[in-house]
Amino acid sequence: MPLVARQELTLTPDPRRVVVKLFVPGEDAAVVRTRAGALIDRVAHLDDEETGRLLRDTFDRFGSRHRDLDGTFHHHYDLVRHRIARVRDLSFTAQLLVGAYFSHEYAVEAAALCNPSMVAHPDQSELDVGQLRVAVSLRQIGEGHLSSIGFATAVLGPGRQLTVADRSGPLVVGQRVGARHRRDLLAAGLAEEHCDNEVTATVLDALPDRYDEVTFERVLGTLPRDLLSRSTGMDTLEHLRRTNAASYATTFPTDTALHQRVLWPANPAESNGMEDARFVRFTDDSGPVYRATYTAYDGRRIATRALTSSDLRRFEIAPMRGPGARNKGVALFPRTVGGRHLALCRADGETIGLTCLDGANRWQEPVPLHGPSDSWELIQVGNCGSPIETDAGWLVLTHGVGPMRRYAIGALLLDLHRPERVVARLPGALLAPDEADRDGYVPNVVYSCGGLVHAGELWLPYGASDARVGFATVPMAALMAAMVTSPPAGPGG
């Protein structure tokens, strides 16, 4: 009898979920030649009546699909106004119409919806006994395989009941705001990029532990001339600014629902996508906070980045540094273990490892936990989200890749106090693609970025062939009983 019970309810990509992006005619051509100036001239030559009619028609067509569309149009106008010869001659209506011509809709999940994680929602009000409200993060993939992070809200229970809240309404892309930077993270980034000289040392020495952009620029502005006059001085300043800018913050209006919020690429390192967010509710002496890791992609390189939020409305975003943060699939533990901040990783591309954060904010060389061994996982293994704490140990959901690049989900159990040690594992796969799962954007895949335990059940959201998101439940008692004890010695000691 299978351990897993699949829910009938699924989430499918909704092409109506759209955001407004800047559109500059000519930039998408094989030979880049912006046609912005000519377009603005044509708009400027429209008479007032035609200008007003076109703008009204645009708002009638698109106004209900977006929040503050006039504000977006004006922002896009500001971005291209330098190409207008006589700015003062344009009426406010004409300015908005220019902004409309330099805008387009982008369906954030038109291509695929997949790879969810699940955490307890910040709002647990108005629930019945046996229910838990959860926040589900989603990888949304649109045109050009561009990924962003979206959300859904669901209620688990009582029993195996599942209700997912309506996801309609205008989407909102987070607004970038001032971040409180960390000096140790800046230092770790400079060290990783081998940028260590008198300029960087002087800047790091002058910065406080936490600082804002104004303080950072003030410190750069007071650097001695004899340092800046060196042949590498200006290059080092550029390097400092680029490394510092890798950390940023984004926020959403207080009256937006969670499912309306979209974490959209806002940094060159993630310009081609934010992929596979693994959220966890982290708890320490200061209380609970949401943390996540995700893969940033710039079109050529990948990088692991971290999110932190107290309310899933304001997010602090920063790169992760060190050998343990290389490659994809970093998943944070929900608390410290023996005073250590720990994470699962796959630094070598095929083995699940355990890494620890050192005093310099770098994730150390990982300890291997589990490599490809069974037939269903011989290509590679990795985690499917943050470890889940149980009385028996840390439950780690894994993924393995087998013949025909078929992804399946398995499970390990780590020692509660010494997570370097694997104490048990599930023989075979827990969840594998069935006939309903195997077809999609990326066939033959089931994959998760994290589940949770509620009322004795493991709730496992999963992506099915990158085409839709499904939900499964597993009785914890049965799962633990099916685990096979591992020998005391192994890769982790």
Image (cartoon, grey):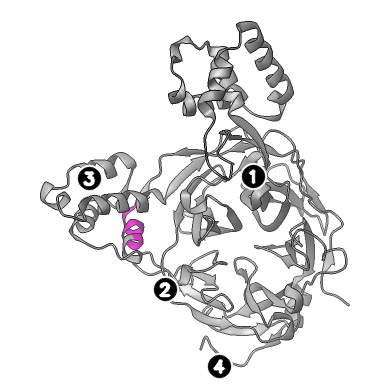
The residue that mark 1 highlights is 123
Q: Which residues are magenta?
A: 182-189
**Mark 4 closeness class: few <14, some 14–19, many ≥20 residues within 10 Å:** few
**Mark 1 closeness class: few <14, some 14–19, many ≥20 residues within 10 Å:** few
Q: Position of residue 293 (x, y in %)?
A: 54, 59
Q: Going 82% across and 74% down the picture, which residue do you hit? A: 3
Identify the element where label 4 is drawn: loop
The residue that mark 2 highlights is 364
Q: Could you say which is closer to the camera, residue 140 or residue 97?
A: 97
Q: Is residue 316 positioned above or below 400 on the image? A: above
Spatial separation of the CA atoms under disc 2 and disc 4: 22 Å
Q: Are marks 2 and 3 in contact (CB under 8 Å)?
A: no
Spatial separation of the CA atoms under disc 3 and disc 1: 41 Å
In the rendered view of the protein, which quadrant contains the N terminus?
Answer: bottom right
Identify the element where label 1 is drawn: loop
Spatial separation of the CA atoms under disc 1 and disc 4: 44 Å
Identify the element where label 3 is drawn: helix
The residue that mark 3 highlights is 219
The residue that mark 4 highlights is 489
First in sequence, mark 2 or 3: give its number: 3
